[in-house]
Image (cartoon, rainbow, N blue to C red):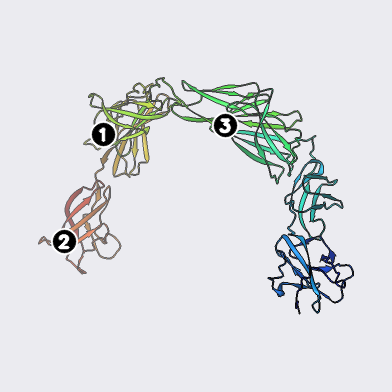
């Protein structure tokens, strides 16, 4: 139990009370001059000839001890421990109290209480195994580096030190910080890597250089190999100034691979100049640079349906490739610097880029690609006249097909029409080269012509005049069909052959008859087609072009076979009244008795009449009939007569 019964301040000590104060801090079992915060400490008396009857107390501060104003519970008795939580300067007072009122003496000392923070450091790995170390927090008096390879080094932390490892690899480095006159210290560890040696026989390779944007503030992309993680790499561009031939335009850091594709922004790419890459370690040492590759600066000019390409570069290339819209169009020698593209169409947008290839002195191949540049082709040249073909389709509408001159593309087509020799009038404007004239009336003499405006807004002369064939067909009293038609106008070298074609209902040609003139008589009518569909095919002199006339249809007369009598006696011969024939699509049959009453009604879908009415046989005799036929054209034809029923 702490106690201090009475403190007597005696100015003149008795001869028997001659003890002076002396004490030392003890921490971790050792006497110290500096106290470490956060660790237990006690104070040990060191007075000469100590009085065995004295009781010693310690006031732990931080201020001076006030004997008139203190709390006895705050005092430490003898070697009682305490822990200082905050760093700072503390006044520790030793209070020596002699029992039985023998008097009290005090003795004060100032001690520094210091924090034991982790002594952090940074490291930079340099070439040839060298690693530099810099202490960040320098409050300790002494620092000791354990480099993890069996060696240590002491420092005061004020300067950067360098240690060289003899073997490449990763090491755990531990830094210990300590104060003079105390046992207050702490440690901090981190892993460092010793960089590998650079192989100067096989330096970094700039494999491909691509100008992404050609501009004063453009961008360039580099594809690199042979990189060594741990090193930084500066990207440099040639200036042409002998005082400072290369300037740094970018830096590659924190590599994790030996290859990289890296883009540098905000760089002047308007000139075709050299680029290179240099490895640099963290200590600022620069090593042998990569191969040198030139960028390519491309410029385009448009002329009369031409694109002129000119490019600038610095040596050395062995070949250039010219690409249009992503497709290789020409390969040129490494001395070339221009190309004229004539295979372009007016009004179209084309994109171009140049690929240069070369080989460096070590025999490694490199590639340089220019920025992609666009050109719009223009021209003031008047295009040649187009070629117009007219032909009837199976719906008896005139289909017009305009063939443009080679290499031309249409902006708009203007079609004109003349009916029965009248003045040509505008029919329509279209962007399609095929057009169907749905307003043409068959048997009208009609002709067409056209112009087109190309993508450069230049309008062609008029095309040829194209007049389709007009066919007329008439059935004669003897059943034959007379055909006559107008001449086709429009083939460059005229018509070589007219051919009469007979079509079925699906538009398939079932018969054809070459002719020498423009008339034809069909005497061998089809026994299968209820409707005869004729058209004329005209073939050009070259045999490569065909046009067709309108379609003319002639309905064949219905052929009906009606018996004069029948015998419904069940012998299997003529037992029913049956209608047979062709060239009709259906019929209705009515049979009348002598009073004019209908005793049978049927169609082609019903069973033939068997001579009964409501299931009862009727008497033999002559009966009138009426047949109404439906033709393929949708018309009706009526036949009447008598049929004799025999029993």
The extreme left residue here reads 595
Q: Earlier in the sequence, mark 2 or mark 1?
A: 1
Percent coordinates x, y for residue 165 in the rendering: 84, 46
Q: CA distance from mark 2 to mark 1?
A: 59 Å
* Residue 239 visible from this viewpoint: yes
> In the rendered image, which residue does mark 1 sit on?
440
| Count of numbered circles on the image | 3
The x, y position of residue 87, in whole percent, is 71, 60
Q: Which residue is mark 3?
A: 371
Question: Where residue 614 appears, x then y in whole percent?
Answer: 19, 68
Q: Position of residue 177 (x, y in %)?
A: 79, 55
Nearest to the eye among marks 3 and 2: give it: 3
Pick whichever of labels 3 and 2 is earlier in the sequence: 3
SS for dot 2:
strand
**Mark 1 crowdedness (10 Å alpha carbons): few <14, some 14-19, many ≥20:** some
Q: Which mark is residue 394?
A: none
Screen quadrant of the C terminus? bottom left
Between tags 3 and 1, which lies in front? 3
Can you identify the residue that label 2 sits on?
621
* Image quarter of residue 417: top left
């Amino acid at each position: 139990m702490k106690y201090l019964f009475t403190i007597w301040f005696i100015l003149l000590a008795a001869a028997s009370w001659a003890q002076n104060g002396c004490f030392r801090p003890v921490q971790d079992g050792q006497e110290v001059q500096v106290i470490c915060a956060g660790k237990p400490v006690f104070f040990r008396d060191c007075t000469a000839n100590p009085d065995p009857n004295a009781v010693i107390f310690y006031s732990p501060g931080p201020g001076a001890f006030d004997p008139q104003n203190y709390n006895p519970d705050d005092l430490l008795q003898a070697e009682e421990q305490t822990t200082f939580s905050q760093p700072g300067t503390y006044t520790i007072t030793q209070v020596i109290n002699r029992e039985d009122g023998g008097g009290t003496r005090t003795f004060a000392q100032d001690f520094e209480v210091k924090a034991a923070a982790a002594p952090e450091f940074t490291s930079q790995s340099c070439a040839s195994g060298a690693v530099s170390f810099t202490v960040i927090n320098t409050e300790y008096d002494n620092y000791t580096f354990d480099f993890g390879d069996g060696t240590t080094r002491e420092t005061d932390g004020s300067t950067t030190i360098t240690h060289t490892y003899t073997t490449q690899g990763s090491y755990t480095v531990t830094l210990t910080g300590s104060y003079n006159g105390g046992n207050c210290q702490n440690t901090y560890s981190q892993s460092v890597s010793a960089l590998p040696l650079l192989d100067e026989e096989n330096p970094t390779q700039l494999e491909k250089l691509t100008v992404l944007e050609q501009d004063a503030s453009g961008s360039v992309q580099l594809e690199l190999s042979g990189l060594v993680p741990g090193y930084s790499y500066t990207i440099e561009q040639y200036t042409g100034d002998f005082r400072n031939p290369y300037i740094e335009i970018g830096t590659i850091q924190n590599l994790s691979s030996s290859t990289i594709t890296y883009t540098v922004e905000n760089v002047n790419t308007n000139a075709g100049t050299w680029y290179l890459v240099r490895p640099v370690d963290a200590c600022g040492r620069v090593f042998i640079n990569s191969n040198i590759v030139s960028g390519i600066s491309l410029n385009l000019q448009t002329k009369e349906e031409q694109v002129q390409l000119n490019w600038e570069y610095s040596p050395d290339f062995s070949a250039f490739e010219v690409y249009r819209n992503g497709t290789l169009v020409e390969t040129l020698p490494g001395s070339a610097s221009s190309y004229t593209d004539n295979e372009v169409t007016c009004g179209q947008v084309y994109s171009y880029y140049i690929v240069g290839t070369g080989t460096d002195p070590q025999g490694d191949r490199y590639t340089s690609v220019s920025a992609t540049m666009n050109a719009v082709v223009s021209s003031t040249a008047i295009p040649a006249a187009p070629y117009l073909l007219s032909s009837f389709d199976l719906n008896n509408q005139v289909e017009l097909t305009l063939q443009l001159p080679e290499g031309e593309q249409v902006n708009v087509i203007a079609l004109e029409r003349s009916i029965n020799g009248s003045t040509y009038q505008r029919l329509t404007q279209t962007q399609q080269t095929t057009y169907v004239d749905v307003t043409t009336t068959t048997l009208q003499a009609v002709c067409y012509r056209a112009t087109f405006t190309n993508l450069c807004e230049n309008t062609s002369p008029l095309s040829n005049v194209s007049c389709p064939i007009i066919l007329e067909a008439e059935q004669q009293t003897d059943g034959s069909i007379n055909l006559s038609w107008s001449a086709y106008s429009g083939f460059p070298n005229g018509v070589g052959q007219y051919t009469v074609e007979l079509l079925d209902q699906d538009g398939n040609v079932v018969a054809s008859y070459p002719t020498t003139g423009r008339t034809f008589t069909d005497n061998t009518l089809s026994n299968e087609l209820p409707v005869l569909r004729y058209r004329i095919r005209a073939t050009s002199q070259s045999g490569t072009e065909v046009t067709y006339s309108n379609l003319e249809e002639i309905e064949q007369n219905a052929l009906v076979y009606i018996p004069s009598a029948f015998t419904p006696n069940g012998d299997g011969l003529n037992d029913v009244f049956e209608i047979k024939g062709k060239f009709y699509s259906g019929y209705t049959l009515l049979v009348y008795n002598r009073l004019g009453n209908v005793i049978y009604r049927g169609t082609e879908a019903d069973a033939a009449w068997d001579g009964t009415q409501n299931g009862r046989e009727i008497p033999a005799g002559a009966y009138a009939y009426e047949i109404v036929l439906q033709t393929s054209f949708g018309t009706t034809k009526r036949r009447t007569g008598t049929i004799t029923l025999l029993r």
